[in-house]
């Protein structure tokens, strides 16, 4: 990473730099060696802390201690060349942080996710130490594919018009991106030699040349193993410029004035920033050891599992754990797999969930019979781990994709009204049962009809998309967002005190009010009103929902563009 | 107290030894700046008056006194009421970064940082800040 090729291309900072450059490279290499020696010890400390978290059943203080150490590791490893370690550390840090931010003990799925990430971090460190950094080797240009570095939000913007640059940087930052602006192509190239952004937004024309942008990108990409995602922006609409953009490997071309919404959509796609949740597998088998063994096989492949040993207990985890797939033993005491499947399929909401049977039975007739009764496929025991993982993963992935068509709104990707209400029932009953706090918010875009009337329905759709994107950006994994109606949204905040939910909604409200929307008519901005309530003072989901609605109504009648807290909270 | 037009003296606060060493190299040897390195918030408060920094560069997550607390304490003194400050943090979320700017920082440098471009990042944030005032 650090081999310096003669005089720096970056603006010289002081006269003695060039003379010192080899000395500095040597110093850095020395520091890196020292850090390498300490790296294993750092990880061992984290693993020790993790042991404590386990054995003390997730005490807050223990979790915080591990979080602190992981945070430090994440923040330092990449500086010394261990980018993979920083990436793995960051994922673990996020998972731990989300556990720490809730008011009660984390559920099994959350614990498993953390456990998986701890193992992964340890593996990454072992691997990194076994293959010491090839920094002494040739080219100085980093060739890490975007997925593997920690700058998943970093965007390089190269634009010589400072007004355009400022506006674009600002609007892009509202959607969670960190924008680093450059006025000159060479400045960006110098930095890109050592830092991988998630994507580059590049103007085409510069004082340096009418195709300076596309030329620069072409040369940048040719010096890399894996290309960086690039989007072009330009006032030029001619085919020559567009062709050059294609040849330079651009993944988008936006005419100025740039439509920010479309740009953000494309940016999301090319940076692949929305990473799916791991698949959840419910294992139903009265053989406890075998169920556990299968669970471990699946965990190794980054799948989250829950085991049920008494078939009669299956309905509860089915509702709460919400698996993507059920792995079921065919021959169980008390209730056979085929019968259980039929019971499950009686429920409308479980008609589609894939069920894979496991059995020592090699009789094909029984296989067909089982599938006929509602199972999806049949696997023979004993099964090789790789076959189990492959079959389960493929089907879980497909099921999730199909399910999302049924439960999600097509414009925004958020849950639809019906499913959101189902979730609310589940979360309310869970919160009641374990005594945790639950908050609920209802949001409605202000004057939406006017947006459609003045700017058209396409613009209206973009506004809806922007709002949902901002929510998705800001909310945690455990929060549940839905599109409740035309311009209405609802958010369920499990394990969240109402003040926190209120603060989050306010943040998004503020940010949304500053987003610039565009239409053929003109640029415009939009606001929303919101009502937030807390389960504590309500008997059930319905009452909670009504209260949120009343609070929303109050926000509207009090001038809009505000969030109102419903009820007084007994503390 | 009027701010310096050019950036020369940086008060740097970081609890992790390895990072201190590499930053010192990056900012002094490569960047040509003059650094006062402190290992904790309390040490920083003690030596600020004598060093008279142009800029405070401070890690967010530190034991005992964290970055923001140290920053606020320093800003409470009339001498350093608008000392330009850059936070260093491994946190990723944009709204968190906005939070630091709302506190009064001129920018945030994310960790892990690239030692070869750290000085330039500091300069960029400094120029942006100077451009605004």
Image (tube, coloured by chain):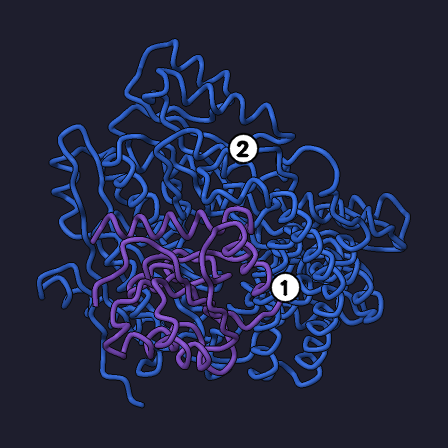
Chain colours: A blue, B purple
Name the residue carrying label 1. A113
Q: Position of residue A494 (x, y in %)?
A: 44, 71
Spatial CA span between label 2 and label 1: 30 Å
Q: Residues within 10 Å of mark 2 (few under 14, many from 20)?
A: many
Query: Is mark 2 in CB contact (under 8 Å) with mark 1?
Result: no
Q: Nearer the viewer, mark 2 or mark 1?
A: 2
Q: Earlier in the sequence, mark 2 or mark 1?
A: 1
Q: Position of residue A353 (x, y in %)?
A: 61, 52
Q: Nearer the viewer, residue A153 or A363?
A: A153
Q: Secondary structure at mark 1?
A: helix
Can you see residue A355? yes
Q: Is residue A85 above or below residue A496?
A: above
* Chain at tag 1: A
* Chain at tag 2: A
Name the residue carrying label 2. A228
Q: Position of residue A237 (x, y in %)?
A: 31, 15
Q: Position of residue A44 (x, y in %)?
A: 75, 71
Position of residue A255 in the picture relative to residue A7 (left or right)? left
Do discs 2 and 1 share a chain? yes
Q: Nearer the viewer, residue A189 or A435?
A: A189
Residue under the point 21% across and 63% down: B2
Q: Is residue A255 above or below residue B42?
A: above
Residue under the point 37% across and 44% down: A412
Position of residue A2 in the picture relative to residue B34 (left or right)? right
């Amino acid at each position: 990473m650090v081999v310096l090729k003669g005089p720096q291309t970056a603006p010289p900072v002081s006269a003695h730099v060039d003379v010192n450059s080899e000395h500095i490279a040597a110093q850095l290499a020395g520091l890196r060696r020292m850090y390498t020696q300490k790296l294993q010890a750092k990880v061992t400390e984290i693993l020790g802390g993790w042991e404590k978290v386990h054995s003390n059943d997730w005490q807050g203080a223990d979790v915080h201690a591990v979080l602190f150490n992981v945070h430090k590791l994440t923040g330092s490893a990449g500086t010394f060349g261990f980018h993979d370690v920083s990436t793995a550390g960051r994922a673990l840090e996020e998972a731990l942080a989300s556990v720490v931010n809730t008011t009660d003990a984390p559920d099994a799925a959350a614990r498993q996710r953390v456990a998986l990430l701890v193992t992964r971090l340890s593996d990454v460190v072992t691997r990194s130490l076994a293959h010491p950094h090839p920094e002494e080797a040739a080219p100085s240009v980093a060739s890490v594919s975007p997925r593997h570095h920690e700058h998943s939000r970093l965007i390089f913007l190269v634009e010589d018009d400072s007004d355009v640059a400022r506006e674009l940087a600002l609007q892009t930052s509202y959607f969670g991106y960190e924008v680093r602006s450059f006025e000159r192509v060479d400045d960006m190239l110098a930095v890109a030699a050592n830092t991988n952004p998630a994507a580059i937004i590049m103007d085409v024309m510069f004082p340096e040349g009418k195709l300076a942008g596309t030329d620069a990108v072409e040369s940048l990409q040719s010096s890399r193993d894996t290309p960086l995602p690039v989007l072009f922006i330009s006032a030029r609409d001619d085919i020559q410029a567009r062709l050059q953009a294609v040849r330079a490997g651009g993944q988008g071309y936006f005419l100025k004035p740039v439509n920010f919404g479309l740009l953000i959509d494309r940016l999301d796609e090319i940076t692949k920033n929305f990473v799916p949740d791991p698949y959840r597998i419910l294992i139903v088998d009265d053989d406890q050891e075998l169920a556990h063994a299968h669970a471990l096989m699946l965990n190794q492949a980054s799948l989250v599992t829950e085991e049920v040993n008494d078939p009669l207990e299956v309905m509860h985890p089915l509702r709460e754990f919400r698996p993507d797939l059920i792995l079921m033993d065919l021959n169980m005491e008390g209730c056979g797999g085929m019968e259980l499947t039929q019971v499950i399929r009686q429920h409308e909401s479980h008609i589609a969930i894939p069920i894979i049977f496991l059995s020592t039975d090699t009789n094909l007739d029984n296989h067909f019979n089982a599938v006929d009764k509602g199972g999806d496929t049949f696997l023979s025991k004993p099964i090789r781990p790789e076959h189990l993982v492959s079959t389960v993963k493929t089907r879980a992935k497909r099921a999730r994709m199909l399910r999302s068509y049924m439960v999600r709104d097509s414009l925004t990707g958020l849950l639809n009204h019906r499913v959101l209400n189902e979730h609310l029932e589940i979360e309310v009953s869970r919160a009641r049962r374990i005594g945790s706090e639950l908050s609920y918010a209802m949001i409605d875009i202000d004057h939406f009809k006017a947006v459609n009337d003045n700017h058209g329905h396409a613009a209206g759709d973009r506004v809806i998309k922007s709002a949902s994107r901002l929510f998705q950006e800001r909310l945690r994994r455990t929060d549940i967002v839905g599109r409740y109606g035309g311009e209405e949204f609802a958010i369920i905040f499990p394990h969240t005190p109402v003040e926190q939910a209120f603060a989050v909604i306010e943040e998004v409200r503020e940010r949304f009010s500053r987003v610039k929307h565009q239409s053929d008519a003109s640029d415009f901005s939009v606001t929303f009103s919101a009502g937030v309530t807390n389960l504590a003072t309500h008997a059930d989901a319905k009452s909670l929902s009504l209260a949120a609605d009343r609070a929303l109504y109050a926000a509207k009648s009090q001038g809009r563009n505000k969030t109102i807290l419903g009820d007084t909270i007994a503390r | 107290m009027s701010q310096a037009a050019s950036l020369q003296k940086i008060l740097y606060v970081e609890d992790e030894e390895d990072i201190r060493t590499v930053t010192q190299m990056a900012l002094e040897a490569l960047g040509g700046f003059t650094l006062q390195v402190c290992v904790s918030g309390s040490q920083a408060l003690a030596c600020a008056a004598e060093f008279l920094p142009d800029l405070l560069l401070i890690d967010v997550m530190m034991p005992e006194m964290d970055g923001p607390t140290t920053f606020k304490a320093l800003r409470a003194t009339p001498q350093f009421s608008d000392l330009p400050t850059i936070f260093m943090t491994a946190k990723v979320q944009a709204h968190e970064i906005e939070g630091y700017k709302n506190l009064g920082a001129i920018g945030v440098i994310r960790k892990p940082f690239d030692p070869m471009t750290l000085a330039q990042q500091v300069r960029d944030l400094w120029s942006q800040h100077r451009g605004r005032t």
